Image: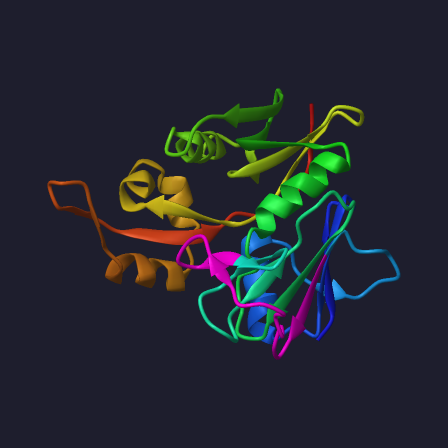
Amino acid sequence: MTVDFDLHGRVLVRLLDAPAAAVSAVTADTGIRPGPATAAAPTITVEFTDDLHLAEPVRRVGRTSGFAGSQFVVGDSPGRRCVVALGTSADFTLRAERAVRHVPHLLALVNIAMLRAGALPLHAAALLTPGGGLVVTGWSKGGKTETVLGLMSRGATFVADEWCYLDPVQRVVLGLRHPIRVWDWQLAQLPVLRAKLTTKQRARLAVTSRVTGPSGLRSRTLRTMLEPTRGVTM
């Protein structure tokens, strides 16, 4: 199976001879639905093969990564390895064995490619409000998701919660759609969002629990996909 993932016309990820599970994983990681291969040149190519046939044994620099000669290899066992491109080439080509599901460092490579295409990657949330576009940046667990959900309950439109891409020339902010984690205490404060949950999401929330903090308090959580992926004018 050969498919393309077009990220706002700026970055094209192509999977060559990919198993269905890998296509599903890239869809989940980027939030972009796959399409048939096009005539456009890909920015990131992932070639799937039965065996990488590495010329040298892997010298480990961690439990799941190392070097085989000049090749950077991610994966802890044959069949699950991926050679990640290193260097200054404008395009990235990765080779992966068929048991690989999540392409290693895919979002990092997308961010580099977006930067080369003139869009600044920013770890931030973004929304479209009646007064214009809003970007909220900050550290992990700093409250970006709570800001997104709170403003959505007041009519704002979701753009992104994790990664945004700022284009200073066209003056737009682009986002990636992806699953975000929503806690039960957040839903309790946002009945508008709770009312939009599907039957499946409600059932999952009811049976899923997670231990948090040294006190052992339990809080139920679910992962939900916010729609749509769109840009917002700066």
Q: Is residue 56 above or below residue 120?
A: below
Q: Residue furthest right?
A: 39
Q: Tell me where residue 166 sits by quadrant.
A: top right
- Residue 67 visible, this angle: yes
- Residue 114: x %, y % from top left: 71, 39
Left or right: 118 as drawn, with respect to 69? right
Q: Position of residue 220 (x, y in %)?
A: 26, 51
Give the residue at x 54% y 69%.
100
Magenta region, residue range: 45-66
Residue 81 vs 66, above or below: the answer is below
Q: Quadrant of the C terminus?
A: top right
Could you tell me residue 78's position as x and y percent? 50, 74
**Residue 133 position by quadrant:** top right
- Is residue 167 toward the left or the right of residue 178 in the image? right
Q: Residue 213 vs residue 86: left or right?
A: left
Magenta includes 55?
Answer: yes
28, 76: nearer the viewer: 76
Outermost residue on the left side: it is: 215
Q: Residue at x 65, y 65 (%)?
A: 95
Residue ID at (58%, 47%): 107
In this rendering, does residue 229 appear at all? no
Q: Position of residue 227 (x, y in %)?
A: 57, 48
